[in-house]
Amino acid sequence: MARSKRYYVTTPIYYVNDAPHIGHAYTSLACDVLARFKRLDGFDVKFLTGTDEHGQKVEKSAQAAGVDTQVFTDRVSRNFRDLAQAMGFTHDDFIRTTEERHKRACQDLWRRLMDRGQLYLGAYSGWYAVRDEAFYGEGELTDGPDGKKNAPSGAEVEWVEEPSYFFKLSEWGDRLLKFYDDNPDFIAPRSRRNEVTSFIKGGLEDLSVSRTTFKWGVPVPGDDDHIMYVWLDALTNYITAVGYPETDGGEYATYWPADLHMVGKDILRFHAVYWPAFLMAAGLEPPKRVFAHGWWTNEGDKISKSLGNVIDPLELIETYGLDPVRYFLMREVPFGNDGDFSRRAMINRMNSELANDFGNLAQRVLSMVNKNCGAAVPMHAGFMEFDYVILNPAQDLISTLREYMDRQEFNQYLETVWSVIRAANGYVDRQAPWKLKKDDPERMGTVLYVLTEMIRQIALLLQPFMPDSMDRMLEQLAISPEHRTFAFLGPDHALVPGTALPKPEGVFPRFVEEDGGGKGGG
Ligand code: ME8
């Protein structure tokens, strides 16, 4: 299979310090939509997610919970796996940084960096934020109201002095800038490029990459007093999962460099600066692209445990159903921008776009087919110009949608599919097949055929976003599972008149706004 038909996409690996929330679900959902799209489009996909289990932050959380650190990480990591299952994610691997394969990869990468003269032993004295697991320069800090110093993220910093190995990051500034110039799609969205380049232009200092004051991490090869800095450990997961240190064949040769690291904007610097620098310094290829998406707030407020407004994705799924939640998260905000989560906005979209625009279209058309066409795909008697106007765009859509996916413009993808849905609704109203029933039953059959075929195409295209609902919709069109990839979008695979169809049923529930969630009629 040609390299271009392979796709390797990763989520961040999440800290196991706390329960997963909507933000974690969001990043992984975007990757799941991409992975599903690429599989339907004929790609050999590897989709990786997992948990980041080392470091001071996790160790402190375990201590606060009064539990052995490994037992604690096992428990919280399980919650992330459960979330992935509840969200319908189709990852091919779930990596945990406490696994043996990962330790091997980290230590091998360390040795490579050492062999190439990229590491040296020194001593670190400076500021560290445990919450971010990051070192900060004095100039980046602000004074908090309590007299303590804060990182730009708002995290509290503490003064650290300890022996440490350093990575010669200061030597990589110009090469990173050249790398971004040579690979203009590396940092996405484009608007985020400046913050990365100005960080580099501000001058890169060597990076402390080991710690000695606690033990919860991967031991530095040849120096047991040190454990590896959690970010060097964590970033390495992306190559561990493709079989590194084996680089000559196997999955590494197949999937590396990754096509996309999906991350939130909070961790762009680690992925767009440190990670490619580590890899280049080790003589390995950097990934192809890093997309930093925006931040969700809840009804206008920052999502935080202390505010008690953490949105539990499992509760949302329970209340609204999985696919409406998946749809809303991908539709509401242009991907890359910050977004505000509001139940009102969610219910509005579920009712107007899912239940009305698409749900009604399918329900009306399939009920008419069921009643008036002998519960089978209608016979058609020659298409007219305006039938093709409706039929053709749906078939041509895929090339546009591919571009949206490759740029991670999920809301544009959905907007485009909805323009087709709206066009189909306009066509039903204009053609009024219910009136044709008496005057021109043949023409009625043709109109209903056009609409049924459109629904098939729309359902195929929406599978990455709403897999279960679209499965149900495609069942109603008697499309077998092996005929649901994008290879079957075109006219050669259009519905065959006379094919028996099962009794239609509504796919999207309608919600009542007042109580914020009660199910109304469907
Ligand atoms: O940073 N809105 O893990 P983490 C949108 N272990 N996305 C959000 C969000 C919000 N309010 N809150 C969290 C780490 N996220 C490291 C990563 S990777 C080698 C190591 C998402 O558990 C977003 O993707 O703090 C963010 O980047 C990630 O969760 C941070 O997860």
Image (cartoon, grey):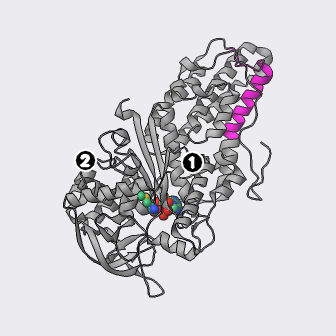
Circle on res. 331: 1
Q: How far across and how far down the image is residue 217, in percent?
A: 41, 66
Left or right? Give the position of 110 relative to 53.
left
**Could you give the CA–CA distance between mark 1 and mark 2, rounded to whole angstroms?**
32 Å
- Whether residue 248 is in magenta: the answer is no
Q: Is residue 290 above or below residue 470?
A: below
State the SS at label 2: helix
Q: How far across and how far down the image is residue 161, in percent?
A: 32, 81
Decide which of 206, 77 is in the foreground and name it. 77
Amino acid under label 1?
Arg
Circle on res. 44: none
Classify mark 2: residues with Cα within 10 Å, few (<14), some (14-19) or many (20+): few
Query: Are circles 1 and 2 on residues that touch, CB within 8 Å?
Result: no
Amino acid under label 2?
Asp
Q: Quadrant of the C terminus?
A: top right
Left or right? Give the position of 67 relative to 259.
right
Q: Quadrant of the N terminus?
A: top left
Q: Nearer the viewer, mark 1 or mark 2?
A: 2
Magenta segment's dominant SS is helix
- Whether residue 363 is in magenta: the answer is yes
Q: Is residue 389 above or below residue 242?
A: above
State the SS at label 1: helix
Q: Is residue 479 above or below residue 107?
A: above
**Which of the marked residues, 1 or 2, is nearer the chain's N terminus?**
2
Residue at the image point whose x is 57% and y is 53% from the top? 81
Residue bounds of the magenta highlight: 356-379
Q: Is residue 449 visible?
A: yes
Residue at the image point whose x is 29% and y is 41% from the top? 248
Q: How far across and how far down the image is residue 400, in percent?
A: 46, 34
In the picture of the structure, the residue carrying the numbered disc 2 is: 182
